[in-house]
Image (cartoon, rainbow, N blue to C red):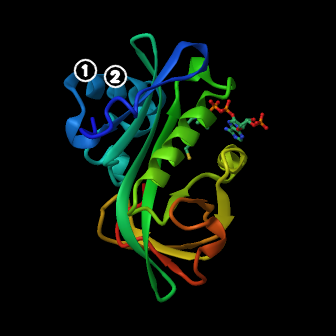
Amino acid sequence: MDRISADAETYAAPMGEVIQVRRHVDLAATEIDALQSLFDSEYLNGFGQWNPDAPYGYSPADTHVLAFRGDALVAHVGFQRRRIAVGTNDVMVAGTGGVLVDERERGTGLGRRVMRHAQKVMRDKPWVDFGFLGCRKEVVPFYESAGWVQVHATERCLSRTDQKSVVVSQGGPNLICSAQCDASEWPEGDIDLRGTPW
Ligand SMILES: CC(C)(COP(=O)(O)OP(=O)(O)OC[C@H]1O[C@@H](n2cnc3c(N)ncnc32)[C@H](O)[C@@H]1OP(=O)(O)O)[C@@H](O)C(=O)NCCC(=O)NCCS
């Protein structure tokens, strides 16, 4: 857990939930096990076992936002610090991924509460210009409901399957959220993630 603000980053939320923030390097073995169970329950059949350091070939989170109901981990949002390129600008983003709510808990606003908490954590970090994520088209309304906005640009990244080949895509969807910069300040131009996506 972040040493300075351990207490400040543990909040009671509605309906007995507790949302906690952990640095990846500080995750306890029990928390890694809980994350493994949460991700495996959703993705084991299609994508194999969750790997904390290369989840399905995506970039790993360096910060985890975890929602518990009692002892049970019921939701997760992760993000990782990275300097990406947008047009001719360098932009510091919290590359966001691993957004997952336990299937039994969906549709109650939990996903949005955890995401909003993650956005608050991002805004408290002086290095985060914007949150950034890519997602499936059908999930865009979920992110928009938490204040993310779509950006339209050509995106270049490394493939999550081999971490080497370059993938160029258009139409994303890619979304950003305000942190130190307002979303309206997102620069024009192609996006280069300079690595694998999240
Ligand atoms: C997507 C997910 C995180 C949403 O969590 P949730 O707790 O069910 O969502 P919430 O109840 O907080 O919903 C908040 C809003 O988003 C909308 N929403 C929720 N899930 C959605 C989905 N899959 N597609 C589109 N909109 C969705 C809700 O309708 C709600 O809108 P409203 O305020 O207008 O009523 C959850 O369904 C999940 O874990 N899905 C499987 C993993 C996944 O797809 N993750 C995203 C990877 S990009």
Does residue 184 sit above or below 57 in this rendering? below
Between 13 and 27, the one nearer to me in the picture: 13
Q: Residue at x 39, y 12 (%)?
A: 71
Q: Quadrant location of the C terminus? A: bottom left
Between 119 and 8, the one nearer to me in the picture: 8
Read off the residue under disc 1: 30
Percent coordinates x, y for residue 114 in the rendering: 54, 34
Q: Is residue 146 left or right of residue 63?
A: right
Q: Quadrant location of the N terminus? A: top left
Helix, strand or loop for disc 1: helix
Q: Which mark is residue 34?
A: 2
Q: Which mark is residue 82?
A: none
| Amino acid bearing label 1 | Thr
Helix, strand or loop for disc 2: helix
Crowding near the residue tagged with mark 2, few <14, some 14–19, many ≥20 C-alpha atoms within 10 Å: some
| Amino acid bearing label 2 | Ala
Q: Is residue 103 left or right of residue 58?
A: right
